[in-house]
Amino acid sequence: NKSATWELEREEFKQVITMGQATLKASMTINGGAAVAVLAFIGHLASTTLQHANIIPFANAMVLFVAGVALAAIAFGTTYLGQYAHSEDKEKVAQVFQATTIIFVVMSFVAFSLGTAIAYFGFVSLSKTI
């Protein structure tokens, strides 16, 4: 039955869109939350007896988290452009934007992972000075 097949494909497409949106939001949220948390921690270090602590690893981690937010924001934009191209029946262009979106989201998660690793080593280093 062609109608049932088409309806199933349509529902699957909706599900893919929903999961993509959730992934975009997650990449923005985790990087943004991490950047705010690290910034607050740096502020705390500056206002305590640990003023002379090495904040470089935390600053570097924050840069990566902010980059992750920027990459996620760009991915939101490429998602819009891909959907616009799709609505204009420009499928090749839409596919390029879809691939670009995926790359930016993956890069956002990589930025988060690297930022987390750098922050971890900053905490390890800090614990040795306490």
Image (spheres, rainbow, N blue to C red):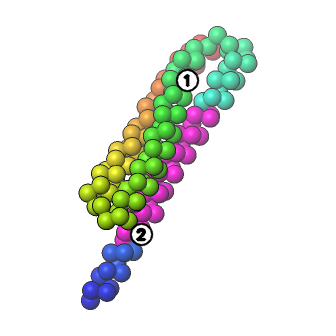
Left or right, 70 with respect to 93, comes to right
Residue under circle 1? Answer: 58
In primary-sequence order, the first of circles 2 and 1 is: 2
Tag 2: residue type?
Answer: Lys
Q: Between 111 and 117, which is closer to the camera in this rendering?
A: 111
Placement of the C terminus among the 4 image quadrants? top right
The alpha-carbon separation of the residues under discs 2 and 1 comes to 40 Å
Report which quarter residue 7 is drawn in.
Answer: bottom left
**Which type of secondary structure does the marked residue at label 1 adopt?**
helix
Please tell me which residue is depicted at 39% across the width and 74% down the height of the picture.
Answer: 11
Tag 1: residue type?
Answer: Phe
Question: Magenta segment: does it hold 22?
Answer: yes
Placement of the N terminus among the 4 image quadrants? bottom left
Residue 113 appears in the picture as rendered:
no
Residue under circle 2? Answer: 14
Q: Position of residue 122 (x, y in %)?
A: 52, 21
**Dot 2, how many residues are within 10 Å of its Cα: few (below 14), some (14-19), or many (20+)?**
few
Contact (CB < 8 A) between labels 2 and 1? no
Question: Magenta segment: does it hold 109?
Answer: no
Q: Position of residue 53 (x, y in %)?
A: 61, 13
- Prevailing secondary structure of the magenta residues: helix
Residue 94 appears in the picture as rendered:
yes
**Magenta residue span:** 12-37
Q: Position of residue 124 (x, y in %)?
A: 52, 22
Residue reaching furthest to the bottom: 1
Left or right, 124 with respect to 4, comes to right
Please tell me which residue is depicted at 51% across the width and 28% down the height of the picture.
Answer: 63
Q: Between 78 and 130, which is closer to the camera in this rendering?
A: 78
